[in-house]
Amino acid sequence: MTFAKVILFSLLGGLILNLMPCVLPVIGLKILSFAEQGGQSRRRSLLLNVFYSLGLLSVFMLLATASVMLNMAWGTQFQSSTFTFSMIVLVFVMALSFLGVWELPIPGFMGSGKSGELAAREGFAGAFFKGVFTTILATPCSGPFLGPVFGFTVSQPWWATYVIFFSIGLGMASPYLLIGMFPSLLGFLPKPGAWMDTFKNLVGFFLLGTVVYLFSILGQKYTIATLTLLVVIGFACWSIGRIPFTASRPKKLLAWIAYPVLCVAVGLFAFNYLLPFEKGTIILGENTIETKTTRHLTWHMYSQPELERAIATGKTVMVEFTAKWCPNCHKNMASAIDTPEVARIVEENDVVPIYADWTSKGDDIRNLLNSYGRDAIPVLAIYRDGDAENPEVLTDLISRNRLLAALKNQPQ
C-alpha cells in the first residue's frame, strides 16, 4: 500500500473504533457530556471536545512510543495481568460512581445523582480523562482497516509509526471535534433533565458488564483475589460517598487516607494468600507424584497408596487435611503451616508434606479422619519412623510454634 492509502485506512479505522464493543459502554460518557454542553457557548463546547480529543490522542502517542521503543503490538498491554487488573479496578469504581454509590473526585467528570446537578458544566480535566479512558478500553479491539495498517508499521521508520497512530487517533476523535465545531448536530438530544439520571445508571450497568469482560482477560488465577479486593473497594467508595458535603476537611481527608490504606492492606492479603496453588508432578523412582505448590511448600497430593509409600520410607510425614469451604483450614495454612520457618524444618529434616483436599466428597479421606477419631477438619497428622498406627494428630486452630515442636518431635 502507498503511505497515503495507509493514512486513509488509519483515519477510517479510528472512526470505526467508536463502534467497537470495547468502546460502546463508554460512549455513554460522551452522550451525557453532549447533553451537558447543550446550554453552553459554542466556544466552550468546542474546547471541551478538544480536551477530550487531546486525552484520546495522548494515549495513541503513548502506544506509538511503546510500539517504537518496546516493539509492543496494538492491544498487547492487556497481556499484562497488572494492566488488566488496574483496568478492572478503574472501570469498577467508575461504575459505582455512575450508579450513585459515590462521586469521582475529578472536576466535571461526573456529577451527583441529581439530574439538575448532572447538567452542570463539564470540566476540562473530566473531558481529558474521558478521552484517555475511552481510548484505553478501545485497544483490545482492532476494527476494519486497522489490520493491514498495523502490519504496515512493522517495516516502517519510527516517524511513520507516530504518524499512523496519530491518524488513527484523529479518526477516532473526528466525530467529537465535528460536534464541537457544529453544536447544532446535537439537536437530536433532549434537553438536560431527569432522563440523564436514568441514562447515567444504565451506563453504570454497562460498565459492570465491561468488568465481567475484563475478568475473562485477567484469567482464573487472579479471580478470587481480585473479587475480594473489589468488595472492599466497593465498601470504601460507599463509605466515602456517605460523608456529607458539609463535613469538615479533616474528616474528609481522614477518609481519603484510611479507606485507600484499607484497600491496599486487603489487596496485599488477597494476592498473597488467596491465589490458587500451582500444580505439577515429580518423579520418585517408579512413581509419578502429583504435587501442589503453596507459597513456601511443595506438597504431595493425597492418595492412600502415596501415604503408605511415604510412611514406609521411614521419613516424617505431615498430612494436612483441608478444604476450600473450611475457613479455619485457610487460617492454619496461612499463619502456621505454609510459613518460612516450617518450610525450613521440612527441608532440613526431609519431611514429606501431603495435601489431603476434602473439598469434594472423598470417602478415603473421611475414613482416615475417622481412624483418628475425627469427623471434621482442620486436622494435621504427623507420622514418624514408619509407624502408620500412632500418628500425632493436631486439630482445630494450631500455632506455628506447636507445629514446629511436633515436627521436631519435642514434647509440649
Image (tube, helix red, strand yellow):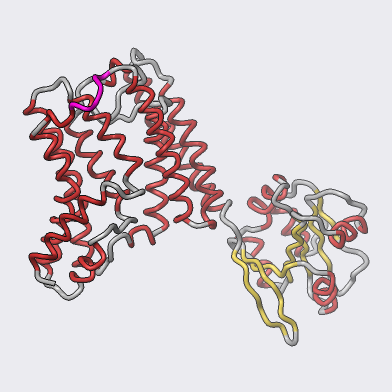
Left or right for 382, reference 333: right
Tell me the quarter of the picture where residue 371 sits: bottom right
Q: Residue at x 12, y 34 (%)?
A: 180
Q: Position of residue 336 (x, y in %)?
A: 68, 53
Instruction: Please say if 156 is above or below 406.
Output: below
In what quadrant of the picture does the N terminus appear? bottom left
From which residue to which does the magenta span run?
Answer: 187-192
309 falls in the magenta region: no
Q: Residue furthest bottom?
A: 286
Number of on-image labels: 0
| Of residues 382 and 134, the one drawn nearer to the viewer in this rendering | 134
Q: Say if 31 sits above or below 155 in the image.
A: above
Residue 189 drawn in magenta: yes
Q: Position of residue 378 (x, y in %)?
A: 78, 50
Q: Quadrant of residue 198?
A: top left
Res 368 → quadrant: bottom right
Q: Residue furthest top?
A: 246
Q: Which residue sits at x=35%, y=49%? A: 22
Q: Nearer the viewer, residue 131 or 291?
A: 131
Query: Left or right of 102: which side holds 158?
Result: left
Instruction: Answer with left or right where residue 79 lies relative to residue 232.
Output: left
Q: Secondary structure of the magenta portion, mostly?
A: loop
Nearer-the-camera pick, 330 or 104: 104
Does 259 sit left or right of 69 as displayed? right
Q: Name above or below for residue 275 compared with residue 93.
A: below
Q: Residue at x 15, y 31 (%)?
A: 185
Rendering coords of residue 141 (x, y %): 32, 56
